[in-house]
Image: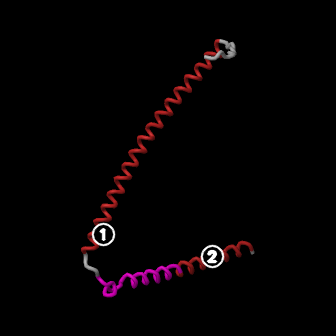
Amino acid sequence: MKKENLVYVKLEYEEAKNSKTKLLSSEINLIKILRVIKKYNALRMEELKLKDKLKKRINSFNANIKKIENSLPEIESKDIPRRTTKRHEEVITKIKENKSKYDSLMEEELKQIQEKLASLQG
């Protein structure tokens, strides 16, 4: 072993005690951090396993749906009457009517408020 130039520093008792305490508390904190990291890694691995299992189930489910769709007869959509479009149009017209009623009520109320304000000012 090579001879090195060593330097010694004198520490007071309280200073040495505080340094030792801080060093030990740092070690405790590092051990706690390592525990948390290990728990995180374990939970992450469990999460990845569950995601993989879910992905396999979804793929299986999709395959079963495809099998069912292939076994069903195909129906031309032109033969099926479309009630949904008529119903959709009715809903849209009702919404427009309600909106116009609401707008007219708002306009009337605005005029009344403006009249009250004008009477108070003049």
Q: Nearer the viewer, residue 5 or 39?
A: 5
Q: Nearer the viewer, mark 2 or mark 1?
A: 1
Locate residue 16 relative to residue 66 in the image: left or right: right
What's drawn in magenta, residue-wise?
A: 75-99
- The residue where tag 1 is placed is 66
Which label is found at residue 54?
A: none
Image quadrant for the C terminus? bottom right
For label 2, the residue is 110
Considering the whole magenta stretch, tell me its main secondary structure: helix
Residue 91 falls within the magenta-colored stretch: yes
Is residue 94 left or right of 107 when viewed as pictured? Answer: left
10 Å neighbourhood of mark 1: few (<14), some, or many (≥20)? few
Which image quarter: residue 91?
bottom left
User: Residue at image x 29%, y 67%?
Assistant: 65
Q: Please state the horizontal and vertical placement of residue 20, each as a whole percent of the image.
A: 59, 19
- Residue 16 is left or right of residue 98, and the answer is right
User: With respect to residue 118, does 21 lie above or below?
Assistant: above
Residue 113 lies in the magenta-colored region: no
Q: Position of residue 11 (x, y in %)?
A: 67, 14
Q: Is label 2 in a helix, a strand or a loop? A: helix
The amino acid type of the residue labelled 2 equals Leu
**The N terminus, quarter of image:** top right
The CA distance from mark 2 to mark 1 is 59 Å
Q: Crowding near pointer 2: few (<14 within 10 Å), some, many (20+)?
A: few
Which residue is most to the front?
1
Earlier in the chain: of badge 2 and badge 1, it is: 1
Is residue 38 depicted above or below 6 in this figure?
below
The answer to whether 35 is drawn above or below residue 11 in the figure is below
For the point 69% across and 73% down, the residue is 117
Residue 58, above or below 107? above
